[in-house]
Amino acid sequence: MPKIAVVIPAYNAARSIGDVITRVSDYVPREDIFVVDDGSSDQTELMAREHGAWVLRHGRRKGKGVSLRDGVKKALDLDYNLLITMDSDLQHDPSEIPNFISASEKYDIVVGRRTISSDKMPFHRFMSNSITSRMISWRTGVTIADSQCGYRLYRSRVLKRIDSRAKYFEYESDMLIKAAIAGFSIGSVPVKTIYNDSKSSIRVVDILRFIKVFIKSFVIRHG
C-alpha cells in the first residue's frame, strides 16, 4: 500500500479548512494531511491544527507556488510515495481521492479534469484555462485538458526530479511542462466543477507569469 500525503495550500480559509480536513480524513489519515497557511489573517492555522493536520505557517503571504513547494518538501522528507494537492475552499471534492489513486497505477501525474465550458465556469476562467491548456499541450505534445486544476496527484519520483521556483499560480503549469518534457506520463480523471460563488484569485499578472514560464520552457534541458 503506497504512503499517501495530501498537501493543501491555504489562505484565509478558516471557514472551510476544518471541513476539508474532516472530509479528506475519510480517505487519508489526518496525520498525513499537510496544510500550509500562507500568511492568513484569520484563524486558518488554528482551525487546521484543531482538526489534526500538520501545519506550516508563513509569517507573510508568499504565494500558492511557495506553499505547494514547502508542503511537498515536507512530505518528500517523510518518504511519502504519492502526493495529492488540493485547494482549501471546498472546490475540490475529497470523495474523488480514490480515483486519483487508482489512476496513479498508470500515470506519474494525474490531473483533475473539470468540465471546461462557459456554462460551467465563469467566462474569464474558461478563456484563461482553455488558452493555457492548449499552449501547454502544444508545447509538450501531451493532451492536458485542464492545466489550471490544482487537484492533482504526483508520484514522488516526479517531485524528486522536477522542481519549480515559481511562486504563484504559474507553479502548477511549470510543473506540468517540466514533467512532460522530462518524459513523465500525465493522465487525468474527471472531477466535479465546483465554485461555491468564490471569486477567482487569478489576475492579469498571473497570465504574464504563465507566459514567462512558457517562454522559459524552451531552454529546458533534461539529461
Image (spheres, grey):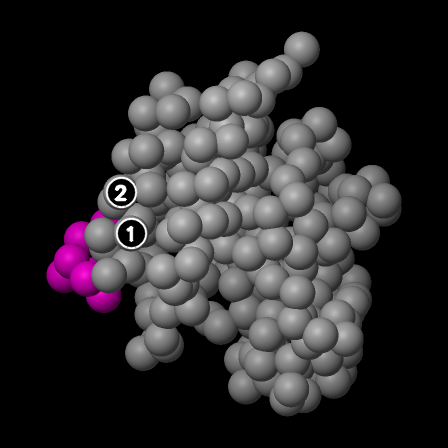
The residue depicted at 41 percent of the width and 50 percent of the height is 208
**Label 1 environment density (alpha carbons within 10 Å; few <14, some 14–19, many ≥20):** some
Residue 168, percent from left and from top: 55, 56
The residue depicted at 48 percent of the width and 23 percent of the height is 218
CA gap between label 2 and label 1 equals 5 Å
Q: Is residue 140 left or right of residue 9?
A: left
The residue nearer to you, when weighing 151 against 175, is: 175
Label 1 sits on a secondary structure element that is: helix
Check disc 1 and give the amino acid type: Ser
Q: Is residue 29 above or below residue 196?
A: above
Residue 207, percent from left and from top: 38, 52
Quadrant where the C terminus is found in the figure? top right
- Residue 128 circle label: 1
- The residue where tag 2 is placed is 131
The residue depicted at 19 percent of the width and 62 percent of the height is 123
Q: Quadrant of residue 63?
A: bottom right
Q: Is residue 12 visible?
A: yes
Check disc 2 and give the amino acid type: Ile
